[in-house]
Amino acid sequence: MDLVGLLISIVVGIIIIAPILWLVGRALVGKQKAKFTDAIWIVVLGIVIGAIVGALIGGIVAAIIMFIIWLALIKHFFDCGWLMAFAIAVVAVIIFIVIVAILALVGISVIALGL
């Protein structure tokens, strides 16, 4: 991944993933532990470390390593245990999928209606 692609991934991650992660974190560990800046750090570090691991290792091994790193980042920044970090990650992914599906449906509707 080149530097421009990495920066675009970071900006998109901050705009899309960080708010979802923050809201789920607040709901599951409380507003004292889950700060928005923490969610931003989780996303930035996760994307940068993911790019490095992906460039060095690749494949299913890299995916497993990155899953553990994302959980460790959530655990560290939201000051929770591994199980709570896993719960935050799962709920955040589910909410992300629902939002993407809704946006896709809206986009398809807009295209179908010719708006």
Image (spheres, rainbow, N blue to C red):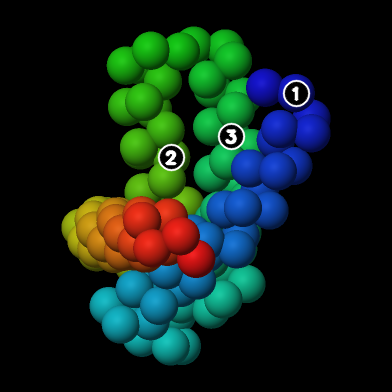
What residue is at 46 percent from the left and 88 percent from the top? 32
Number of marks in picture? 3
- Mark 3 closeness class: few <14, some 14–19, many ≥20 residues within 10 Å: some
Q: Secondary structure at mark 2?
A: helix
C-alpha span from label 2 to label 1: 21 Å
- Picture layout, residue 96 above or below residue 32: above
Q: Which mark is residue 49?
A: 3
Q: Which of the two labelled residues, at mark 3 and mark 2, occupies the earlier sequence position?
A: 3
What residue is at 40 percent from the left and 78 percent from the top? 23
Q: Are marks 3 and 2 in contact (CB under 8 Å)?
A: yes
Report the quarter where the N terminus lies.
Answer: top right
What residue is at 50 percent from the left and 71 percent from the top? 19
- Picture layout, residue 62 above or below residue 110: above
Q: Secondary structure at mark 3?
A: helix
Q: Which mark is residue 77?
A: none
Three-letter amino acid code at the position of disc 2? Ile
- Mark 1 closeness class: few <14, some 14–19, many ≥20 residues within 10 Å: few
Three-letter amino acid code at the position of disc 1? Asp
Q: Secondary structure at mark 1?
A: loop
Q: Which of the two labelled residues, at mark 2 and mark 1, occupies the earlier sequence position?
A: 1
Front one among 109 and 66: 109
Instruction: From the image, tell me which residue sits under label 2.
Output: 69
| In this view, the mark in front (3 or 1) | 1
Instruction: From the image, tell me which residue sits under label 1.
Output: 2
